[in-house]
Image: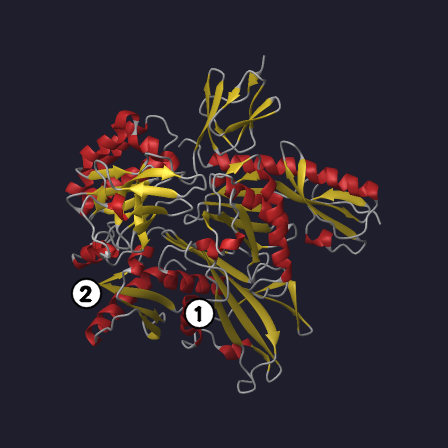
């Protein structure tokens, strides 16, 4: 296990170098997606690996009454649990603000981008709609949970098939061949800034040394469909523009893994 | 006459029976249960005549007096620094053992060693309840500036050092790096450039992963030569 | 009612898979799968135990945490968070592993084992114990023996080893008996029972469970040693 100080990372970053010899725009290897890891119990599931970071996600479906203000729409719910198993820094207990931010950013990328047409989740207007519940768990947290969790959620949605409905009640034991209606996959990439330079896919040490980060999600037509800035330092407009260009390039690579 | 049930260097699990018979003497991480000699750890069996030992393959560092260790300062008060040396409890570096300089009463300790600093220190005492005293007084002991830290399983440290230091000397020579190996598995690597440091780090991690493989010194040598050529391109 | 298994013998366990070192950040870790039940365990520690009053002056203590992932249940989504059931399972898991563990080298500390279920099809607490036992060995802790666990049971009238979900829910009556054993001595460290059963059938079921544990021991040994096979 490698432990590199913030100062050292910053010194290297200013020269465009990283402690593990990666380029600033290089993801760790392997980047892989495995589908159906919990296929017996979850309607959809997937495991995503980015370097040492491993995240698993699952989709469970439910039927119920819609929200009164959206009588013909189903909905999604995204939950992230930072398991104490995945890092010595995570403790048991209610979701921390880090877990909540992760969940809401992943949610935003799917919900607000209209990647799922919620009207297609409606069974009977005003009476019965589908709810998709996505639960995301890091198994080994070694940096870049933003990208890994988002990718895992998408892969689980892609893997999912609706269960059989019998008289408006779900029979979890039988699954149909019907996938979740995804208009497109909103793939996201988080770009970090240290020492004035931008890079992607930070290790845990690099994440601790970060000045600022910007997560951007794109549709398959290269339109921006979600954003979230984090970190202590501000970003200039020029920097934001550079980051968006870098992120777009990277999401094209990530998209190929799905 | 008893019988030995395992081969030399065979990997065994906790609870595995190594030998039967009262002739055999368990040592290290082997214990006796009636007629049987049993392993207490996941490790390699070592048979030396009648002596049966286990060389562990994993496990947390257990501090012993005189050990040279590398630790990180995690806290301090007005008279000592608390240092994380990878044991379940932090080690204590008292101000009078921390430096040969004269430290005035009420002086700001962080001016000497601050939180996050890595120190090369020696274990001066381990009490019955496993409280650990550290000292900076000794040759080569100092605050480590620059470079990077690699953490390996303490059980693999002897393999990294090698017979009479052969393995670690070779890595130092081939990468032009200063390398300090702590008994607690914490290794400090400092080179003239990040590429050299990276190669040294990779070699160290390779030794850790392949500690049980024979002919390791040659393999690591070959690895370093290959990587060096790659860097020159 | 007479019950007969279709896909395997009454004494036979479901197919098993095990792997060690699956969580890099943890000191020790393992995955154990039996049938469709998948459990992962990760060990952290020995580390300082807080609050102080829980510390033991002459030894470390073991603390096991059991959790089901929300999508691991065979029906509805499982609400995240600790339940009374998961806390009880954490307790009996700790009690099942303690007799095998020797933490005297680490006074005042705690060893935390986190067990996660990725998919469940009966036998979850036993699978968790099997994974945890390998993870503790992988972590380099002193152990007198590994711990193996599997459920024994009586389905209808028939004693079996390793009940699956359908057998647990069998209409003609089912008795579920989770058992954990230290294989070298055969000593039992976990024993629970759900259902009603005669003394004779109970003894038969217990015997089948203990024999089943020997099969598990082979799988665990192979996984632990497999990490160190020469390349």
Residue A1 location (% of width, % of height): 34, 46
Task: Work out whether A143 lies above or below B7.
Answer: below
- Image quadrant in which you'd find residue A168: bottom right
Q: Which residue is mark 2?
A: A196
Depth order, front residue of A129/C116: C116
Task: Work out whether C93 lies above or below C102.
Answer: below
Asked whether the residues under the numbered discs 1 and 2 touch, taking CB atoms below 8 Å apart as contact, a structural biologist would say no
Residue C153 location (% of width, % of height): 74, 46
Depth order, front residue of C129/C11: C129
Residue B207 location (% of width, % of height): 32, 35
Q: Is residue A196 visible?
A: yes
Which residue is outermost to the top? B1
Q: CA distance from mark 1 to mark 2?
A: 28 Å
Using residue A171 as the reference point, say whether residue B76 is left or right of it: left
Residue A46 location (% of width, % of height): 48, 58
Q: Is residue C35 visible?
A: no
Which residue is outermost to the bottom? A69
Res. A18 mark: none
Res. A100 mark: 1
Which residue is outermost to the front? B105
Q: Are marks 1 and 2 on the same chain?
A: yes
Element type at mark 2: loop
Image quarter (top left, top right, bottom left or bottom right) of the C terminus of chain A: bottom left
Element type at mark 1: helix
Q: Residue at x 56, y 29 (%)?
A: B16
Depth order, front residue of C156/A139: A139
């Amino acid at each position: 296990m490698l432990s590199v100080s913030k100062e050292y990372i910053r010194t290297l970053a200013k020269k465009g170098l990283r402690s593990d010899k990666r380029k600033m725009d290089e993801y760790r290897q392997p980047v892989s997606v495995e589908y159906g890891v919990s296929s017996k119990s979850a309607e959809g599931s997937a495991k995503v690996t980015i370097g040492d970071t491993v995240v698993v996600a699952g989709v469970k479906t439910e039927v119920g009454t819609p929200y009164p203000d959206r009588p013909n729409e189903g909905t999604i719910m995204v939950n992230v649990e930072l398991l104490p198993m995945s890092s010595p820094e995570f403790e048991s207990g209610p979701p921390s603000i880090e877990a909540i931010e992760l969940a809401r950013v992943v949610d935003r990328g799917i919900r607000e981008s209209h990647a799922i047409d919620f009207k297609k989740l409606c069974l009977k207007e005003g009476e019965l709609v589908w709810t998709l519940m996505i639960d995301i768990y890091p198994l080994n947290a070694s940096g870049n949970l933003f990208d890994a969790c988002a990718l895992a959620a998408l892969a689980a949605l892609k893997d999912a098939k609706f269960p059989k409905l019998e008289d408006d009640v779900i029979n979890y034991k039988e699954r149909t061949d019907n996938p979740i209606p995804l208009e497109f996959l909103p793939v996201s990439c988080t770009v970090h800034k240290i020492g004035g330079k931008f890079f992607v896919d930070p290790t845990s040490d690099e994440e601790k040394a970060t000045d600022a980060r910007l997560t951007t999600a794109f549709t398959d037509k290269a339109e921006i469909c979600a954003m979230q800035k984090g970190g202590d330092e501000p970003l200039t407009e020029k920097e934001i523009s550079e980051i968006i260009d870098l992120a777009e390039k990277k999401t094209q690579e990530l998209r190929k893994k799905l | 006459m008893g019988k030995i049930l395992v081969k030399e260097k065979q990997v065994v699990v906790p609870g595995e029976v190594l030998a039967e018979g009262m002739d055999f003497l368990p040592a290290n991480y082997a214990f006796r249960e009636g007629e049987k000699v049993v392993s207490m750890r996941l490790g390699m069996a070592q048979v030396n005549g009648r002596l049966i030992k286990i060389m562990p393959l994993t496990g947390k560092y257990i501090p012993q007096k005189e050990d040279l260790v590398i630790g990180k300062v995690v806290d301090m008060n007005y008279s000592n620094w608390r240092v994380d040396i990878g044991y379940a409890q932090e080690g204590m570096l008292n101000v009078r053992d921390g430096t040969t300089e004269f430290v005035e009463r009420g002086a700001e300790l962080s001016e000497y060693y601050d939180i996050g600093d890595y120190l090369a220190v020696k274990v001066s005492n381990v009490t019955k309840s496993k409280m650990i005293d550290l000292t900076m007084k000794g040759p080569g002991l100092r605050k480590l500036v620059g470079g990077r830290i690699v953490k390996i399983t303490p059980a693999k440290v002897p393999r990294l050092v090698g017979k009479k230091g052969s393995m670690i000397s070779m890595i130092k020579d081939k990468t032009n790096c200063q390398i300090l190996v702590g008994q607690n598995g914490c290794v400090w690597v400092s080179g003239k450039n990040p590429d050299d440091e990276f190669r040294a780090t990779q070699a160290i991690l390779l030794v850790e992963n392949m500690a049980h493989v024979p002919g390791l010194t040659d393999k690591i040598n070959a690895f370093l030569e290959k990587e060096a050529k790659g860097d020159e391109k | 009612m007479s019950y007969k298994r279709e896909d395997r013998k009454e004494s036979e366990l479901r197919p098993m898979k095990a792997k060690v070192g699956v969580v890099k950040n943890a000191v020790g870790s393992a995955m154990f799968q039996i049938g469709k039940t998948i459990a992962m365990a990760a060990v952290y520690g020995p580390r300082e135990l807080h609050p102080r009053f829980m510390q033991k002056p002459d030894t470390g203590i073991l603390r096991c945490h059991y959790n089901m992932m929300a999508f691991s249940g065979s029906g509805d989504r499982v609400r995240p968070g600790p339940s009374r059931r998961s806390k009880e399972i954490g307790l009996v898991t700790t009690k099942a592993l303690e007799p095998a563990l020797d933490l005297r080298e680490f006074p005042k500390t705690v060893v935390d084992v986190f067990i996660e279920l990725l998919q469940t099809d009966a036998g979850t607490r036993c699978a968790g114990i099997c994974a945890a036992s390998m993870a503790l060995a992988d972590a380099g802790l002193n152990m007198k023996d590994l711990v193996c666990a599997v459920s024994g049971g009586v389905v209808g009238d028939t004693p079996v080893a390793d009940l699956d979900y359908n057998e647990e829910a069998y209409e003609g009556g089912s008795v579920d008996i989770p058992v954990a054993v230290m294989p070298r001595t055969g000593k039992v460290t976990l024993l629970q029972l759900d259902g009603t059963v005669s003394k004779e059938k109970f003894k038969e079921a217990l015997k089948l469970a203990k024999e089943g544990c020997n099969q598990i021991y082979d799988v665990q040994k192979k996984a632990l040693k497999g990490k160190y096979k020469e390349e």
